[in-house]
Amino acid sequence: MPTISCKPAILGGTPVRTRPFAPRVTMSQAEQQAVREVLESDVLSAFIGASGKFFNGGRRVTDFEAIWCQRLGFKHAVSVNSWTSGLVTAVGAIGIEPGDEIICPPYTMSASATCCLFYGGIPVFADIDPETFCISAKSIAGRITPRTKAIMVVHLFGHPADMDEIMALARKHNLKVIEDAAQAPGVLYKGRPVGAIGDLGGFSLNFHKHIHTGEGGVIVTNDDDLAHRCRLIRNHGENVVTGDDPAELVNCIGNNYRLTEVQAAIGSAQMSKLDACLSTRAGLAEHLRRRIDKLPGLRAQAHPADGSTHAYYLLPVHFNARQAGLSRHQFVKAVLAELPKPEGFEGTALTEGYVKPLYLSPVYQKRIAIGSKGFPFHLAPAGWPDYSAGSCPVTEHMYQNELLLCPVVREPLTTADMDDVASAMERVLEHAAEISRNVPDSATLFTPVAAAMDTNVR
Ligand SMILES: *Cc1c(COP(=O)(O)O)cnc(C)c1O
């Protein structure tokens, strides 16, 4: 047993650290200069919602899209005003019809599934793999019906999903594959960039993501026809299609999902920081993992092998209460007591679980989404899909018991900061029995990610 050095903060001892973690600083001279140039040009957006030179936007938008293609080898990049818009666009572009089923993971941001509903597609939830936390091919296989049209893959927390198995299933059953790589920009799966391994996919550029434009997103694909359809949906496609080919009309009615020149200019400057961001996070995650993996009851997610990479949007950690000697809730509460009071999500060292499994939310429980009569759910056979509690047991177990997330593996933090986080965990585990006896446990989650994000003000 290590010598009991110091009482844990949650039982009245001195915390490991009180100095706040340095805030993330994302905008530099480069972005400021780029924005200034756009302002001086006075053209904040050049899009026109009709055929012609500006149907696909102005110079900054097209330059920004070209950078994505050059940097990651995609044939097409189509910028949008959010990745939620991008997901809706992708679902429209693959030709989803009302009543079609799309197999989605339940452990993800809500938009990964709600995007289907806008076109009358019905999300069918498949369980996740307990090691990657991404949708599992085995679970997908059990959910395929004659109505299945597509698979939504999410590269959760920045770890790539098992694309070989998923693509094999998709080919066998003639399904489209959309990749939600919001949390995985620049990530490789066996040497190939995620996003367009399937039919199409893309990335989020919201404030919380690796690189951002405030709000924004990018769809990527290697398919000319899908890229064309995405551009129609992004910008009032109804004004541009000829109707000579009726197939071109399917889902072509467009929205306004356009990115501004200002955002595109910021995005181009941000792209030159992506590599540094990814390598900083990989270094911090590696450092923290080495210390975490020595602790009883904790195991950080392994770095992927075989030429795959991880973006470390967050570092997932498996928690075993029996081995640790206290509950997950007590552990998180006690670790946070050792560390500076979080100023928003990015200063939170540890959270319990991720979002609630999506099928447990009211939209799926009550089957009401578009209008009041149950569209599109009423198009499915009675009793299908199964949205009941227990339908994705791995996801529910991760949510309720096993998963911890470390959001602090991010720039501009250092390995010294990671050491403080690890020391806080160590001290808590050294006093596990005492904490377990004296700190109230709770059935409700202490800091699910969404609640921590609510406090994001500065
Ligand atoms: C952030 C995120 C989205 C939504 O992206 P926005 O740009 O905020 O619309 C979708 N899916 C996942 C997995 C995300 O993390």
Image: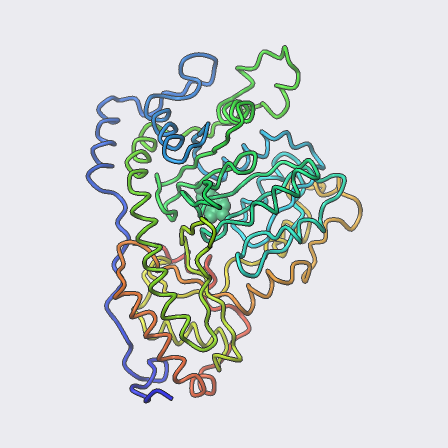
Task: Name the residue at 61% across, 53% down.
Answer: 136
Above or below, 107 against 349 in this view is above
Q: How many marks?
A: 0
Which residue lies at the image location 27% right of the left edge and 63% below the top edge?
A: 415
**Who is closer to the viewer here, 310 or 305?**
305
- Residue for point 22% across, 27% down: 37
Above or below residue 72? Residue 435 is below
* In front of the other: 173 or 158: 173
**Looking at the picture, how far across and down is residue 82, in whole percent?**
44, 37
Counting from the top left corner in percent of width and height, residue 70 is at 37, 30
| x, y percent for residue 208 | 38, 49
Identify the residue shown where x is 54% and y is 27%: 223
Identify whether 235 is placed above or below 144. above
Relative to 281, residue 121 above or below: above
Q: Quadrant of the C terminus?
A: bottom left
**Does residue 456 appear left or right of residue 325 in this picture?**
left
Q: Position of residue 244 (x, y in %)?
A: 63, 10
Residue that protrudes farthest toward the front in the picture: 306
Instruction: Give the quadrant of the N terminus.
Output: bottom left
Q: Is residue 404 left or right of residue 367?
A: left
Camera-nearest residue between 283 and 135? 283
